[in-house]
Amino acid sequence: MIVPLLAIALGGGAVIALAAWAGLAAIGTEVWQAAWVVPPAVALMLIQLYLSAIAWRISVGAGPRLGRYFRIRWIREAVNGMLPVAQLGGNILAVRMLAQRGVPGTTATAGTTLDITVEVVTQLIFTMAGFGVLGLWGPAGAASWAGLIMALMALSVGGFVLAQRIGLLRLVELLIRPIARVFPGVTIESVRGLHAELMRLHRDRRALLEAGALHLLAWLLGVLETWMTLWAMGLGGALAPAFVIESLGMAARSAGFIVPGALGVQEGGLVVVAGLYGIPADAAIALSMVKRAREVIVGVAGLVMWQWSEGRRVLRRARPD
């Protein structure tokens, strides 16, 4: 618990330092200008979660109706984004909630692993597209370092996929007892035969393509939020800068997964990327604040939904037959 708390402190300190450097008054003015964007941004985020829920259900290939997948996907995002769980706790909780709703534990674990993989691969495609747009319509020389970054990202994603192919999840099966001590929601039943089940899901090419298309569409919707926010702050309405800022900014945020909410990482990434288009640091941080406002609204609602769901389950167990 010490490491997450230290990460929060460092990330929060970075946000405060960046805001003080850029100018609190200017940031406050720009956030106020763009405040009307928050409700449509919340709606867009829920659409993104719904598309991701459809993709997840396709990856798992079994389970409850789509509405329940959507609620669990919402909770999964809220836990990963709002709590110091290094993007792991929400996924493990989601597997547990699927298993409670009738999905075999191995299928739920393998399908969720595949869903995360498809999401990561489509983010790589989205980021590469962002570098492409930067090279075509960005400032001269701005994409000179893009090749190295894309190569490193491709290697890391490719390594993740390859590790699954050669038996990474067999290691999880072997280490289940110590893992279960850290994450009580994980059981032996949920990982028995996990590698074989994941390989079975990998062979469904149509499902992979459908899930990938949905995740990619969800990533693209984020461009609309960035475009609206920049327009509201009077920084133009061109789609190319919004595309680059969203795709590369999200890549920076993902790279800072160890920091809860990517505190400081998101702000720093947006300052760098937005600066390529001459957008000042105060506007970039204001953009981040608008994004965080909708994350907090959706995240808090997701945590409340989770506690409500757990409370109902406890009450049902306590109710005499």
Image (spheres, grey):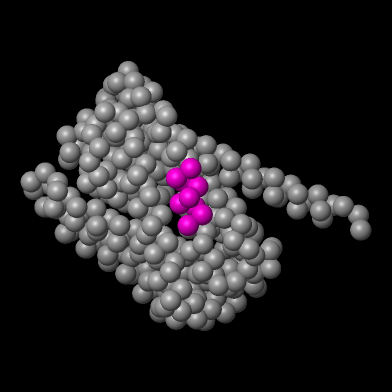
- Residue 8: x %, y % from top left: 44, 38
Q: Is residue 27 above or below residue 191?
A: above
Relative placement, left or right, of 298 versus 255 is: right
Relative placement, left or right, of 111 versus 124 is: right
Q: Is residue 272 above or below residue 256?
A: above
Outermost front residue: 237
- Residue 202: x %, y % from top left: 45, 77
- Residue 187: x %, y % from top left: 64, 67
- Residue 67: x %, y % from top left: 61, 57
Outermost top residue: 25
- Which quadrant would the C terminus be assigned to in this image? bottom right
Of residues 3 and 286, the one drawn nearer to the viewer in this rendering:
286
Q: Quadrant of residue 25 in the image?
A: top left
Q: Quadrant of residue 23 in the image?
A: top left
Q: Is residue 44 magenta?
A: yes
Q: Residue at x 32, y 69 (%)?
A: 158
Q: Residue at x 30, y 21 (%)?
A: 26
Residue 120 seen from this side = no
Outermost right residue: 321
Q: Residue at x 34, y 37 (%)?
A: 228
- Tell me which segment is drawn in magenta: 43-51
Q: Is residue 138 magenta?
A: no
Magenta span main SS: helix
Residue 102 seen from this side = yes
Relative placement, left or right, of 294 versus 273 is: right
Q: Residue at x 54, y 66 (%)?
A: 57
Q: Is residue 96 above or below residue 258?
A: below
